[in-house]
């Protein structure tokens, strides 16, 4: 069955879109109570507030996948995007079913590195550099890319541990191929003291390097990016600084190198949340990350002035595919004994992707 056929088969009835927010919440709550301990709902930080209200746990993608694996629930209704649900399926048991409320909830960054492109690139890169490259992939990638890294001796990384993982990897091989987010790779490597001149971008569409290739290259960056974080600019940061003399700026390392260098600090979503939580009352912050989270922080910490580094930016469009209508529909189908939108990763890919994840979780203890 093709992906389009699956969407047609498991399409949500139109009646759900006609229900009010209050009615959807009431029906979702009833379904949730009927399912009881058989249900676990992880909610990513970037989800809508009305979805987060139902989350049993809120966090980043890997944290939520690990929590899903620890629960004994039969059903994991993962409120995030496709690659996150894949990771949850990889880490949970075969008896547990992982469900994505809307199959259209993908990730543009993850989609920028498909397995066919990656395998072709690997042939070219190893022909040029020999057996000197180790692949690392950000967890914001498809299961197939995680499996590719597992198959070739590499691992996954998160925005929190990318620095440690890159250091460990460079002790094993002379060079790294960093997938799929060039900005996280560049920012992390630069912080480790690797100059920009020793990094080069691989363009998977044109199938060539962007820049001059030399034997000094240490980091090969896949030409991918987060469509949300790449939109933050230094120009707007300077505008905000001119309007707020005491402004502090914190951004996610998925932002461009120029933005990260101009900010006061950068860090993972968890670091951003903890920094705002620890900040003194009365301080002023501009945050360069997804809008739903920035709004939630502003509403939570009313003793501080919190704004987006780009107030005209929309929330992550694919994250926002998970709405109350699809969420309620999935829960009510489960009550009736029907599983819709199940995410199921192939057994071979699961095993290889699990290897890449385990190498990270156990610090390359291969």
Image (spheres, grey):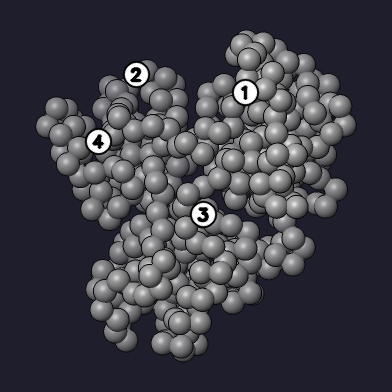
Rounded to the nearest whole Å, what is the CA distance between mark 1 and mark 2?
30 Å
Going from N to C along the chain, the mark reached first, 2 or 3, is 3
Q: Nearer the viewer, residue 339 or 9?
A: 9
Q: Are marks 3 and 4 in contact (CB under 8 Å)?
A: no
Look at the numbered disc 1 and give the secondary structure of its residue. helix
Look at the numbered disc 2 and give the secondary structure of its residue. loop
Residue identifier under label 4: 248
Label 3: few (<14), some (14–19) or many (≥20) C-alpha neighbours in 10 Å = many
Coordinates of residue 23 in the picture (x, y in percent): 67, 11
Relative to residue 158, is residue 217 drawn left or right? left
Residue identifier under label 3: 110
Rounded to the nearest whole Å, what is the CA distance between mark 2 and mark 3?
37 Å
| Above-or-below relation of 316 to 358 | above
Relative to residue 247, is residue 166 drawn left or right? right
Rounded to the nearest whole Å, what is the CA distance between mark 2 and mark 4?
15 Å
Going from N to C along the chain, the mark reached first, 1 or 3, is 3
Residue identifier under label 1: 324
Residue at 20 percent across and 44 percent down: it is: 234
Label 1: few (<14), some (14–19) or many (≥20) C-alpha neighbours in 10 Å = many
Coordinates of residue 206 in the picture (x, y in percent): 38, 70
């Amino acid at each position: 069955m093709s992906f389009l056929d699956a969407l047609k088969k498991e399409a949500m009835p139109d009646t759900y879109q006609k229900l009010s927010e209050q009615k959807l919440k009431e029906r979702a709550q009833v379904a949730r109570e009927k399912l009881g301990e058989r249900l676990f709902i992880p909610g990513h930080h970037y989800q809508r507030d009305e979805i987060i209200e139902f989350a049993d746990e809120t966090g980043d993608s890997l944290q939520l996948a690990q929590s899903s694996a620890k629960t004994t629930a039969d059903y994991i209704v993962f409120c995030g995007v496709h690659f996150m649900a894949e990771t949850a399926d990889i880490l949970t048991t075969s008896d547990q079913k992982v469900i994505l409320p809307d199959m259209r909830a993908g990730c543009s960054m993850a989609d920028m590195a498909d397995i066919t492109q990656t395998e072709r690139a690997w042939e070219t890169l190893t022909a040029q550099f020999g057996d000197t490259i180790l692949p690392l992939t950000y967890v914001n990638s498809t299961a197939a890319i995680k499996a590719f890294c597992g198959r070739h001796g590499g691992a996954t990384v998160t925005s929190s541990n990318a620095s440690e993982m890159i250091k460990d990897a460079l002790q094993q091989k002379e060079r790294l191929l960093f997938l799929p987010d060039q900005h996280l790779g560049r920012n992390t490597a630069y912080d480790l003291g690797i100059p920009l001149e020793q990094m080069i971008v691989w363009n998977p569409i044109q199938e060539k390097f962007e820049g001059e290739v030399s034997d000094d290259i240490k980091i090969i960056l896949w030409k991918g990016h987060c469509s949300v974080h790449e939109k933050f600019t230094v120009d707007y940061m300077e505008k905000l600084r001119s309007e707020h003399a005491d402004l502090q700026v914190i951004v996610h390392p998925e932002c461009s190198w120029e933005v990260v260098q101009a900010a006061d600090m950068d860090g993972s979503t968890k670091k951003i949340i903890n920094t705002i939580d620890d900040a003194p009352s009365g301080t002023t912050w501009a945050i360069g990350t997804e809008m739903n989270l920035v709004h939630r922080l502003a509403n939570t910490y009313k003793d501080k002035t919190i704004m987006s580094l780009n107030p005209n930016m929309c929330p992550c469009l694919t994250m926002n595919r998970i709405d109350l209508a699809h969420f309620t529909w999935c829960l009510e189908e489960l009550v009736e004994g029907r599983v819709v939108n199940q995410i199921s990763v192939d057994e071979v890919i699961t095993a290889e992707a699990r290897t890449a994840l385990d190498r990270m979780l156990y610090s390359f203890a291969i």
